Amino acid sequence: MKKAFITGISGQDGYYLSKFLLEKGYEVHGTIRRSSSINTSRIDPLIAEYEKIEKLFLYYSDLLDASSVSSLINKIQPDEIYNLAAQSHVKVSFDNPIYTTQVGTLGSLSLLEAIRNSEKPSKFYQASSSEMFGGVDSNSLSDASIFIPKSPYAVSKVFAHHITTVYRESYNLFGVNGILFNHESPVRGETFVTRKITRAASKIALGLQEKVYLGNLDAKRDWGHAKDYVRMMWMILQTDEPEDWVIATGKTTTVRDFVKMAFAYAGIELEFKGEGIDEKGIVVSCLDPKYQVEKGNEVVAVDPRYFRPTEVDLLIGDPTKANTKLGWIPKYNLEELINEMMESDLKLMTKDQYLKDGGYTIMNYFE
Ligand code: NAP
Ligand code: G4F
């Protein structure tokens, strides 16, 4: 029975990866952070199923506490280490640049040092990001493309990426970078654009919200499903030779088209009119009798609050190496991903939940 150690187990990928590994029979050890309110909601079903039977173990640990990270690795002696912990919001990284950078750089380095000093040669997976490319290249991006990071978050990921390579080459350590393009799911953090859209489209369809305010509608992303991407994280740690991988779908879509597809799931057709900060998304028709949204309603508007100091305009990945060398083929396309997210959010957005959220005025502030 293999042992995996996952930092950031309470996040989106932490949930899908730990579920995947537990179902494979792994013993999973994960770190969570102490917070003033409980932050394990995503993994609560896994805790209920696997903690009592001693398959899932959780520890309080912050990646910035190098001593706690190294004690855990010494104690657990994992076969595989997945470093998923990060302050992962690009816009927030401009507001908290030092913290984001510390976690992204020193956090990853602390793990590598702990592995280097451990007797067990644990395999190491670093969660690298397509943000490192900076969106200046309109070609499909591969692991050979150059990095032009445009945010504190992206710069910290470039450091972690390179230091993983340095440890691989210097100490013969099995360290790999998975350069993952955007991946989403029903448990995606609510402040990332896809989940913000599916939550808002659900509330608007149910008459619980009038409008959603977004930032750059022209931004293009290569969106996949987190479930497909965590499978690939595991696959690349099963190879014999450590190397870096791009994980992407090879297709890119604007935020505007994502909005249209999400509303379409609820039978609501939108058209966009106007330009720049005056652009609006307007209801053309609402065909599903379950939802009563009036034709002509303005349900999407632009708020410059959501613009970033610098934007990554376009990301499209080239997954050929993953497809051909490892046989990794994503099971979900974008429409299936959006449908799953909408189905889930429509169920969650009951009136009680909406009131518990504090109403959309408060939510809009943070989202
Ligand atoms: P996420 O949902 O934001 O989860 C991040 C996890 O890191 C959470 O468990 C969080 O804990 C934890 N964390 C944050 N700061 C920490 C610290 N100082 N010490 C210990 N844990 C800390 O992110 P995700 O979408 O699952 O992404 C997983 C990783 O892949 C991240 O490193 C992200 O940067 C990277 N990545 C993501 C994507 C994507 O599209 N999702 C693409 C490329 C790369 P709390 O729950 O307590 O906040
Ligand atoms: O959903 P986002 O916040 O994701 P972003 O910035 O691409 O970062 C995500 O993917 C990276 C991989 O490329 C990860 F490394 C990172 O951890 C994270 O998971 O924004 C996507 C796009 C951006 O261009 C943003 O400007 O959507 C645009 N956008 C437009 N309106 C918005 C909004 N983004 C957010 N969060 N909120 C908006 O209202």
Image: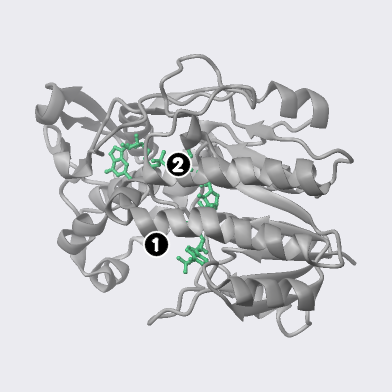
Image vertical order of residue 112 relative to residue 284, above or below: below
Image coords of residue 189 (percent x, y): 42, 56
Answer few, some or many: residues within 10 Å of disc 1's Cα (few below 14, many 20 plus, some between 14 and 19): some
From the viewer's side, name the closer residue of 195 and 235: 235
Return the disc, 2 or 1, that comes first in the chain's sequence. 2
| Quarter of the rendered structure image containing ligand 2 | top left
Outermost residue, front side: 170
Which residue is under mark 2? 155
Residue 212 left/right relative to 10: left
| Location of the N terminus (image quadrant) | bottom right
Residue positioned 52% across, 44% down in the render: 157
Q: What's the distance in space between the residues labelled 2 and 1, CA to CA?
A: 36 Å
Question: Of the residues shown, which amino acid type is indicated by label 1?
Answer: Leu
Residue 288 left/right relative to 344: left
Residue positioned 50% across, 75% down in the render: 33
Image coords of residue 161 (percent x, y): 60, 42
Residue 65 left/right relative to 121: left
